Image: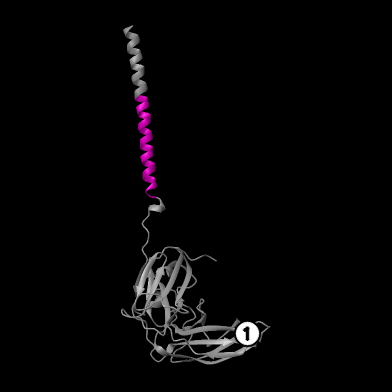
Amino acid sequence: MKSSILSTAAIALTISIFTSCNNTNKEVSSETNSGAESNTPAETPMKVITLSDFSASPDFPDAQLAIKDVKTEMKGKDSVKVTISYNVKGYELKHQTESDIAKECNNSKDGQHIHFILDNTPYAALYEPTRSFVVPVNSKHYVMSFLSRSYHESLKNKNAGVLLYFSVNEKGVYKKLDNPQNPMIFYSRPKGDYAGNDTQNILLDFYVYNATLSPNGNKVKASINDSTFTLDTWKPTFIQNAPMGALKVKLELLDKDGNTVSGENTVIERTVQLAAETPTK
């Protein structure tokens, strides 16, 4: 009888130990999974976008850009071809800007150029002083043009940029209109796709018209993804630490009280794409 009781106790003890060991293994497995989850991308520290001023670019105090003439011709019944010719003085188009900055960011292999901005849409780079484009009849348009260094930074001296406000009627006749007196901002960079080293320093550049940025005056609010910056000086700036993928940029021209300036060409948004590696062809 005693032997039977002891045998039963031994079996019970064995089952208890076996069950305990199995429970312990489940808890370790759960903790291991928990540890693995802590290293998932969702918990990886996010990059914080920053703006960084860079050293002064070569100055071109004598550079001038002016509109030489404007010609139009009808293209069918509903469209007009407009051709603008420019005069460029004190500045050499197609020349590489002599600066180390050209090695730090996206730089045009074709050299210095004109940024041509029609109605605040993405600019066209002009390496020759002329541009043709098509607009509808019975329409009004803004053309902002300014000289650019080979790495796309605008020349900010007074005579390096020119604004044209014009209309064409139903017969394609061109008429120059008086430029508005309200402050405006025209978007320039970033633009297009960036890959590899070009994603490290991304030029943020724009052109302000009828406005001077200052701590007590107009400012520019730059919203870049989820980060917001207020700029009270017009100077060269790099966007740094930007994550790969879509980079959304919104520029707003503010008055001295921090309110968005009313009127046309005061708020512009763009989205560009960033990739860690240059695509292979």
178, above or below 8, in the image? below
Q: In the rendered image, which quarter contains the C terminus?
A: bottom right
Instruction: Residue 1: name its quadrant.
Output: top left
Picture residue at 56% right of the left edge, 84% below the top: 140
Picture residue at 40% right of the left edge, 72% below the top: 222
Measured as percent of width and height from the top left, residue 71 is found at 59, 90
Say left or right for 22 vs 73.
left
Of residues 236 and 59, the one drawn nearer to the viewer in this rendering: 236
Instruction: Residue 167: name its quadrant.
Output: bottom right
Q: Main secondary structure of the magenta part?
A: helix
Q: Is residue 34 magenta?
A: yes
Picture residue at 51% right of the left edge, 84% below the top: 143
Q: As shown in the figure, which amino acid type bears the numbered disc 1?
A: Val
Instruction: Residue 26: name its quadrant.
Output: top left
Measured as percent of width and height from the top left, residue 18 is found at 37, 25
Highlighted range, magenta: 17-39
166, above or below 252, in the image? below
Residue 138 appears in view: yes
Measured as percent of width and height from the top left, residue 165 is found at 51, 86
Residue 153 appears in view: no
Circle 1 residue: 80
Say left or right for 5 vs 89.
left
Sort mark 1 into few (<14), some (14-19) or many (20+) by Cα contacts within 10 Å: many
Q: Residue furthest top?
A: 1
